[in-house]
Image (spheres, rainbow, N blue to C red):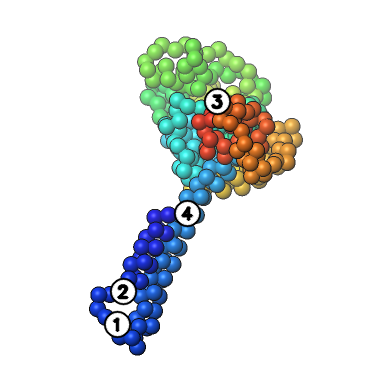
Amino acid sequence: MAAAEAAAVVLSSSLKPDSAPVPESAGTAAATAPTSSAMAAAAALAAAARTGSEATVSKPALATKLLSLSGVFAVHKPKGPTSAELLNRLKEKLLAEAGMPSPEWTKRKKQTLKIGHGGTLDSAARGVLVVGIGRGTKMLTSMLSGSKRYIAIGELGKATDTLDSTGKVTEEKPYDKITQEDIESILQKFTGNIMQVPPLYSALKKDGQRLSTLMKRGDVVEAKPARPVTVYSLSLQKFQPPFFTLDVECGGGFYIRSLVSDIGKELSSCANVLELTRTKQGPFTLEEHALPEDRWTIDDIAQSLEQCSSLLPAELALKKSKPEESNEQVLSCLNGLSRTTRRHCHPNYLPRLLKVSLTMVYGKFFREFWSPL
């Protein structure tokens, strides 16, 4: 509107006659020149106004598309951030792209964008992290118990309090007599259905708090009892003392750090994890499905959701939505309702995508009952 008004001002001011008299023979030419200039200026400003209007409209459209995303996909987690920190970063990028409030702003309000992950990956580890968005968060439980595959590089001769290279060294033992055959000969003991003691630095909880949080705070934490876990396959890929590389496929609840530590003890030495990469989680692989951070966009995730839907078992596939009424039809109906009636409308009477739009436009009326799918 400001650009259009400016165009009108330019046009009207340019058509005002100058104080100097204009010869009658040149009147037509003199009048035409400022008119053409004014029209050009008005056209340019009008074009700018249209461009700004289009940019403004695109944000609600992106927000609607973002909140309609539903399913499971995978991202590539780098070393450094925790799984929770990575999800927050992903959420912030998506909300910023859609022009929506950041998680900090909506921290005390009901979250409009539901995102979760299907299994914690250590901060020092990298690889596949399965993410659920929208209704896809309800499918993540199956990912927690599903199979995972890792490439782990262990270091013999050193033990740490975290069982990996990020921790404080607590013990050192010789390893020079350990051979490749020695390692290969004991791997069978760690294959199949076995019992494993989880590490103290883990996502397991005591009294509602993570063990890792309690340990970092200096609290005394007792080790959790051994629990049954499953290792489907375990092989030695490389041995160059003091380092050894393992290829592990395991079930849910299994800790690679505990495995490497137990292998060191079985060899009458000690060991910790130097590097850890999750190469596969369920049907999602690092090479084919995990989105790097530069592809954490609404369009890329929508495309990935469509591709990954075919990888999921039929019983986990999201049911297709029923045909929806147009936004115009329902809006025209709602326009005839009072605010009080709107406030108490049940969301099931509104199409799914429109509920998102109404939440943005009439948020103060619908916030009480609306929840993301």
| Front position among marks 4 and 1 | 1
Q: Are marks 4 and 3 in contact (CB under 8 Å)?
A: no
Vertical arrangement, residue 214 with respect to residue 360, above or below: above
The span from disc 2 to disc 4 (Cα, nearest Å) is: 34 Å
Q: Are marks 2 and 4 in contact (CB under 8 Å)?
A: no
For label 3, the SS is loop
Most foreground residue, 333 or 150: 333
The span from disc 2 to disc 1 (Cα, nearest Å) is: 9 Å
**How many callouts does the rendering have?**
4
Residues packed near mark 1 inside 10 Å, few (<14), some (14 to 19) or many (20 plus): few
Amino acid type, residue under disc 3 in the picture: Glu
Residues packed near mark 2 inside 10 Å, few (<14), some (14 to 19) or many (20 plus): few
> Of callouts 4 and 3, which one flags the residue occurring earlier in the amino acid sequence?
4
Q: Is there any visible trace of residue 87 in the rendered image? A: yes
Residue at the spot of label 1: 22
Most foreground residue, 140 or 5: 5
For label 2, the SS is loop
Residue at the spot of label 2: 17
Q: Position of residue 226 (x, y in %)?
A: 57, 15
Vertical arrangement, residue 28 with respect to residue 227, above or below: below
> Of callouts 2 and 3, which one flags the residue occurring earlier in the amino acid sequence?
2
Residue farthest to the bottom? 25
Residue at the spot of label 3: 368
Amino acid type, residue under disc 4 in the picture: Ser
Most foreground residue, 224 or 78: 78
The span from disc 4 to disc 1 (Cα, nearest Å) is: 41 Å
Most foreground residue, 60 or 337: 337
> Of callouts 3 and 1, which one flags the residue occurring earlier in the amino acid sequence?
1
Residue at the spot of label 4: 53
